[in-house]
Image: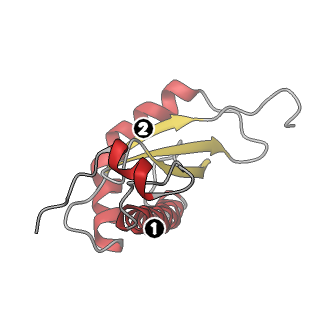
Amino acid sequence: MRRRIVKQNVLRHLCAEQDATDGVDPRDDQRSTSRKRSDRKQRQLCGQVAETLSYVLSGRDADASLSQIQVFSVVPAPDAGRLLVTVAPLPGERLDPTVVLDALERASGRLRDEVATAVTRKRAPLLAFRVALPGPFDR
């Protein structure tokens, strides 16, 4: 069934007051609620990935430089197919960010494999990493 396109001049004759919602399909408002559901699913995925990466990085098999970092946040970048993982050194640790990023790049295949086994999805998300350095007041 095709939608009817209503001209604005026809609407003016049918109503006493013209409103911004005149001529708008009310079904379009319902479609915006599905976006909220996908946001919930993205947050759920990011939480599962953060938890999995925290376990893997704190494990015995982790590289020495990777065992001294913690997962700070995981956010979709730009969607759930690619996730931006922000890591930070453990309290009291001073690390070179380039060394940490190199170690994460070397271990990215293994980390993505661990994420794929922990999260049920058709495709495992790509992981991009960044290091958050402690500020001058974080001692």
Identify the residue at the far front of this view.
13
For the C terminus, which image quadrant?
top right
In front: label 2 or label 1: 1
Q: Position of residue 111 (x, y in %)?
A: 35, 55
Q: Is residue 67 visible?
A: no
Classify mark 1: helix, strand or loop.
helix
Identify the residue at the far left of this view.
1
The answer to which image quadrant residue 125 occupies is bottom left
- Which of these two is toward me, 77 or 28? 28
Q: Position of residue 29 (x, y in %)?
A: 44, 63
Q: Is residue 71 left or right of residue 10?
A: right
Query: As shown in the figure, which amino acid type bears the numbered disc 2?
Result: Ala
Q: Is residue 120 above or below residue 49?
A: below
Q: Is residue 75 left or right of residue 136?
A: left
Q: Position of residue 45 (x, y in %)?
A: 43, 65
Classify mark 2: helix, strand or loop.
helix
Cα distance between the residues tagged 2 and 1? 41 Å
- Which of these two is toward me, 114 or 67? 114
Which residue is painted at 49% across and 68% down in the image?
40
The type of colouring in the image is: secondary structure
Q: Sequence order check: which comes first, mark 2 or mark 1?
A: 1
- Which of these two is toward me, 46 or 7? 7
For the N terminus, which image quadrant?
bottom left
Which residue is painted at 63% across and 32% down in the image?
95
Provide the residue designation for mark 2. Answer: 103
Q: Which mark is residue 33?
A: 1
Q: Position of residue 14 (x, y in %)?
A: 42, 58
Q: Is residue 76 above or below residue 46?
A: above
Query: As shown in the figure, which amino acid type bears the numbered disc 1?
Result: Thr
Which residue is painted at 58% across and 51% down in the image?
73
